Amino acid sequence: SQTIHQWPATLVQPVGSPLSLECTVEGTSNPNLYWYRQAAGRGLQLLFYSVGIGQISSEVPQNLSASRPQDRQFILSSKKLLLSDSGFYLCAWSGEGYTEAFFGQGTRLTVV
Amino acid sequence: SQQGEEDPQALSIQEGENATMNCSYKTSINNLQWYRQNSGRGLVHLILIRSNEREKHSGRLRVTLDTSKKSSSLLITASRAADTASYFCATRWLANNNDMRFGAGTRLTVKP
């Protein structure tokens, strides 16, 4: 069966520090991968999605970036965090086509 | 920008009552999906309804879709305290099946 792993679960980082969140999927190949951000009590904002290795579509121009170095690995990065980067970050995968998505458990990022 | 918009933003009912949540969207879709999120956790897929379907059932869940009004509703019958969660609709765009957008969600509280 397919599983998705996202870590760390919580993270407290100072302003200006770098960020690296990792997401990996098991049990499937060539998944579509997604990074979403959720502000407290709000909906999900699509940040990036990827349909293949090295293929990244960016939805929100900001100081975040994403990379897909391997088929089932999706990384969210920042060189210098801002206070406004605080939030709940969710990774998800879906199969090819118009299918449902499966989510990781999320990372709670607090920038101080 | 987010595709779907749910209403109400918050809903509080007694156990045993039915809960109805609505979702509106803006562009042509291939399908619409409903997800549930317990506080601080990832989202879990509940049900998917395709654009050529008008109604779908899954256990105590009933989803309707009106493509002429670009709206959908989720009905949870005989609610339980364990149904307390946030519920989100998500749309798969017809023009880009890799893109999946979520609304702001409805926070449902079921009082025992």
Image: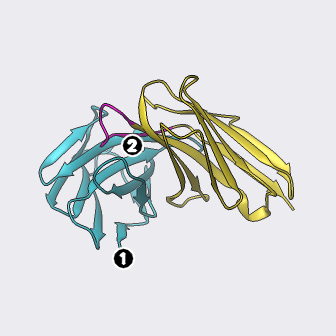
Chain colours: A cyan, B yellow
Main SS, magenta residues? loop
Specify which label sits upstream in the sequence, 2 or 1. 1
B3 or A11, which lies in front? B3
Q: Residue at x 59, y 38 (%)?
A: B54
Q: Which residue is drawn at 84% across and 49% down?
A: B13
Classify residue A90 as left or right of residue B49: left
Q: Position of residue B58 (x, y in %)?
A: 63, 58
Classify residue A40 as left or right of residue B3: right
> Above or below — where is B76 with respect to A71?
above
Residue pointed to by mark 1: A1
Between circles 2 and 1, the one closer to the viewer is 1
Residue pointed to by mark 2: A85
Q: Is residue B96 magenta?
A: yes
Q: Where is residue A66 in the image (x, y as percent from the top left)?
A: 22, 48
Q: Is residue A75 magenta?
A: no
Residue type at tag 1:
Ser
Classify residue B96 as left or right of residue B43: left
Which range of residues does the magenta coloring cover?
A: B93-102
- Callout 2: helix, strand or loop? helix
- Tell me the distance, in whole angstroms, between the alpha carbons under discs 2 and 1: 33 Å
Residue type at tag 2:
Asp
